[in-house]
Image (cartoon, rainbow, N blue to C red):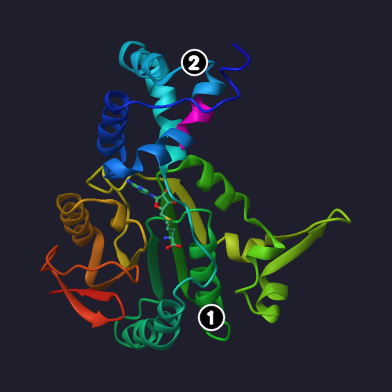
């Protein structure tokens, strides 16, 4: 038995197809058949943790044991999501925020006296993206008091959300952050061997973290958003799922609201409801 739990446990087509369908239903992530080995290796740890000797038994338990299914499905989601992210990833979007979006919001506020901005970061992963947005906002509004700023940061994966909420990053994650911003917005915590950077309350205070599955709509928020970040997640979804998500975004975006997607993603052929502004930045059509 011990040997069973140390070697690689192989998955056959039948069990792969069951898990592939389950993952699609639960997350929208469409796994192609060449992802079989990837899935096998990501789920091997789940079999070991549950002391289940093979995928046949694992799938059988998922199909027959409701309480196991409910707990395990969360673990499967956490194992299959790809969480790659970085501070200042695709920096042109933060330049757009600083040079175009925020000046525009300031200009609008002169007319409607609403010094308020709401941003939704809809696939926040381990937090680097919402914290980069927060730094950009705080830097922009340094000498401009009275603004009510809030970022809602969501993800389907509860592990990455926990990391995001903790807001503590190893030194090698911090290289995209300029030294003066590192000092201003992070506290250095060291145990003598390693150094970690802990986000300061001023940054964290702008962000509310929540679990949200983009597949589960309508999205229930108290307020509409001026801007939605949805970067590097729709690539994992098929076209009908993408279409549905962008349709749901329309409902929670304010008039002329902005939608930002990842550099390898597009709304072309997916949604006609947004105007392309360049560099994967879109605006909801009136
Ligand atoms: C590659 S990361 C991108 C992170 C960040 N947006 C960026 O561009 O750096 C994709 C994230 O989408 C999340 N995700 C995948 N499926 C999701 C779903 N159905 N609903 C919400 N988030 C999802 C994953 O958990 C992961 O953290």
128 displayed left or right of 217: right
Q: Secondary structure at mark 2?
A: loop
- Residue drawn at (23%, 59%) of the image: 249
Give the magenta part as a residue range.
42-46
- Quadrant containing the N terminus is top right
Query: Pointer 2: what residue?
Result: 52
Spatial separation of the CA atoms under disc 1 and disc 2: 58 Å
* Residue furthest out toward the right: 192
Q: Secondary structure at mark 1?
A: loop
232 up-or-down from 111: above or below = above
Q: Determine which quarter of the picture holds residue 54.
A: top left
Q: Is residue 43 magenta?
A: yes
Query: Pointer 1: what residue?
Result: 145
Q: Mark 1 or mark 2: which is in front? A: 2
245 up-or-down from 52: above or below = below
Of callouts 1 and 2, which one flags the residue occurring earlier in the amino acid sequence? 2
117 displayed left or right of 136: left
Q: Residue 223: image x %, image y %?
A: 32, 58
Point out which mark residue 257 bears.
none
79 up-or-down from 1: above or below = below
- Residue drawn at (14%, 62%) of the image: 270
User: How many marks overall?
Assistant: 2
Q: Is residue 13 magenta?
A: no
* Most common secondary structure along the magenta stretch: helix
- Residue drawn at (58%, 82%) of the image: 142
- Quadrant containing the C terminus is bottom left
Q: Residue 247: image x %, image y %?
A: 16, 57
Q: Residue 254: image x %, image y %?
A: 24, 68
């Amino acid at each position: 038995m011990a040997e069973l739990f140390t070697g690689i446990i192989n998955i056959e087509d039948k069990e792969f197809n069951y898990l592939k369908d389950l993952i699609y239903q639960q997350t929208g992530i469409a796994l192609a058949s060449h992802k079989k080995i990837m899935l096998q290796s990501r789920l091997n740890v789940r079999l070991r943790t549950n002391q289940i000797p093979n995928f046949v038994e694992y799938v059988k338990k998922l199909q027959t044991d409701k309480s196991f299914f409910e707990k395990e499905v969360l673990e499967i989601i956490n194992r299959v999501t790809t969480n790659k992210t970085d501070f200042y990833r695709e920096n042109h979007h933060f330049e757009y925020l600083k040079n175009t979006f925020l000046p525009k919001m300031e200009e609008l506020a002169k007319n409607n006296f609403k010094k308020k901005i709401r941003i939704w970061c809809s696939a926040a992963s381990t937090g680097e993206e919402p914290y980069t947005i927060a730094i950009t906002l705080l830097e922009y509004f340094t000498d401009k008091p009275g603004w009510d700023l809030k970022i809602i940061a969501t993800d389907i994966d509860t592990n990455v959300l926990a990391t995001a909420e903790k807001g503590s990053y190893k030194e090698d994650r911090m290289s995209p952050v300029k030294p003066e911003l590192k000092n201003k917005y992070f506290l250095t915590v060291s145990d003598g061997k390693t150094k970690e950077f802990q986000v300061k309350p001023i940054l964290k205070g702008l962000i509310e973290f929540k679990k949200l599955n983009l597949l589960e709509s309508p999205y229930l928020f108290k307020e509409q958003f001026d801007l939605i970040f949805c970067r590097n997640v729709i690539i994992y979804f098929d076209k009908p799922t993408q279409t549905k998500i962008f349709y749901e975004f329309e409902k929670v975006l304010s008039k002329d609201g902005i939608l930002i997607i990842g550099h390898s993603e597009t709304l072309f052929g997916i949604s006609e409801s947004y105007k392309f502004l360049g560099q994967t930045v879109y605006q909801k059509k009136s």
